[in-house]
Amino acid sequence: MMIGFYAMIGKRNLVKKIIGMNLFQTAIILFFVSIAAKRGGTLPIIEHGHGVHAIQATAYVNPLPHVLMLTAIVVMVSTLGVALAIVIAIYKRYNTLEEDEILKLRK
Amino acid sequence: MILQSPALVIVIPLIFAFLNPLFGWWRKGLCYPITLVALSLSFLASLHTLHIVITTGTIHYYLGGWKPPWGIEYVVDYLNAFVLVIVSFVSLMVAIYSKRSVEQELPEKIVFFYCIFLLQVTGFLGIVITGDLFNLYVFLEIASLAGYALIAVGEDGAPFASFNYVIFGTIGACFYLLGVGYLYIVTGSLNIADLSQILPNLYHSKVVLVAFAFFLVGVSIKMALFPLHVWLPDAYTYAPSTVSALLAPLMTKVGAYVMIRVMFTVFAPYFSIELIPVTTILGWMAAAAILFGAILALAQIDLKRMLAYILVSEVGYITLGVGLANRNGLTGAILHILNDAFMMLALFLVVGAIMYRSGKREISQLRYLHRKMPFTMAVFVIAALSVIGIPPTCGFFSKWYLILGAIDANKWIFVAVLLVSSLLNVILFFRCIENAYLEPVAENSSVGSELAITREESPLTMLVPTLIAGAGILSFGVLSGKIISTIIQFALPAGF
């Protein structure tokens, strides 16, 4: 997570920044998924769940963070798409992806 | 009767956003009326929601019939409903205004512009109405992504400004998401009402503190609070004028709303005020934001850029109200959400109209504009007076409550900051007004050159929203006592 964060702030190349952004987001997704894990937990699929059995929550991995992360992955992909589209627009305009050179050209 | 209006507020713009490309593919001219229809329906729904809240109290709307804390819930109380109406009204005004300006600035992209425009509004409304922290994150990202795209289609420097915004916005959203994760670890819940019941027993846990810090930093980036504001001026300067008029009044206000929600509803006020000195820190940051925003605005030549820095300082006002954390301060903050939305709307609409007519945007080029565009400039003066804080306009009243709050809290430095910033705003705006109104007519002011300055008022679709915004500033000023007694005093979080 910190590597991604560093890349977003420290790197001068725009594509490297995007890679950093992706690392950062993936790390958060892993963080959420790791929350769900339980010692000895199994897949959260309940077999023969017709009756009103008491379900032992400790025996199953918590499925909710996974579901949340599905949404977060969608958000991440669309952020990546928008960022890349913007980078293409920048490249067409300035012919470079180095932040310093762009700032010089804008003066 | 099952109450559907809270869901309709969100669903209508969302559905119409996707209908827009379909109709636009068939006939381009349809996009504008469709957008207007969607936003007016959404505005009516939000008015209806506010009416229900005032008559019967807080609404709980369970999406798909799933009961919280499992399902996603929309909770509408006074604070929500109030901000909802502001958001839907401002976006309707900007949509009406957008016709000519979009035709001029983005002639080939009209269809997709309106599609993303509606998505943007959906995001804002969703942030405000939802009662679920993760759902809030999703809407925050919808609003931000649409914002990145809208800013990037602007003029020359826009893609680069937008890229910086993407980086900052993503950091902010990721911090927010981490905060949600930490809270989920300790509580196992994402529902705001549920969290506020579970959390008080856990206030001394370090995890909760970390979550709170992540929330606060994330939201501060999104609302451009002072040291984290660097993305804002560039982004709003280069964005198309319609987009700045939509984003500037709303993005920051919605951020402020989220901040109030997290600090005082998810966490109890005594946690944010007494257990950790967060409000004090926020107060000082806000004071710095007010001063630096105004001082940096002084240094700008570009009118739009100057407004962007004024916006930074206005965000400071709202945060200062939150940071004071007493009754008057919060009343001022919530009232300022309304007032500032309208002030910024009016100012950015005026600048858009000036750029549309003359293509000029530097303060020194405003000359003779009061003859060319008398109504537009009149609205500019009203909005300027309101930002400065002169009585009949609404800006005076929220500042009044903020100053009262600062006095109540015995923070005399904040009182001084508020007064000094008013003076700085006087300098700022009189520089513009002087350039526009008082410039001596050129030496040979014969009849010929008098006639040469013809009236070029902005087109009707642009003029009407501008005038409504100006009228709004005046009438909210006159009615502010009533607004406070019917809505805001109930909108204050419990415990004040």
Image (cartoon, rainbow, N blue to C red):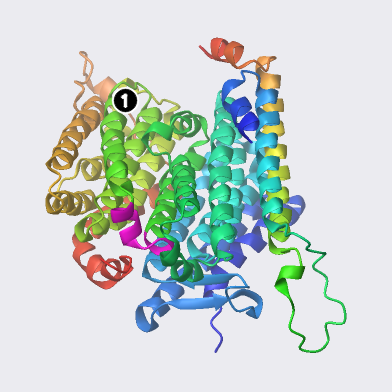
Query: In x, y percent, where is residue B73?
Result: 56, 72
Q: Disc 1 designates what residue?
A: B296
Query: In x, y percent, where is residue B88?
Result: 47, 60
Q: Give the side of residue B352 with respect to residue A23, left or right.
A: left
Most common secondary structure along the magenta stretch: helix
Query: In x, y percent, where is residue B208?
Result: 47, 54
Q: Is residue A77 above or below residue A47?
A: above
Does residue B250 appear in this view?
Answer: no
Residue type pointed to by label 1? Leu
Q: Nearer the viewer, residue B63 or B250?
A: B63
Q: Kindly indicate the quadrant of the structure image that contains residue A56.
A: bottom right
Q: Nearer the viewer, residue B213 or B354?
A: B213
**Could you tell me which secondary element the residue under label 1 belongs to?**
helix
Which range of residues does the magenta coloring cover? B264-275
Q: Nearer the viewer, residue B62 or B69?
A: B69
Q: Quadrant of the C terminus of chain B?
A: bottom left
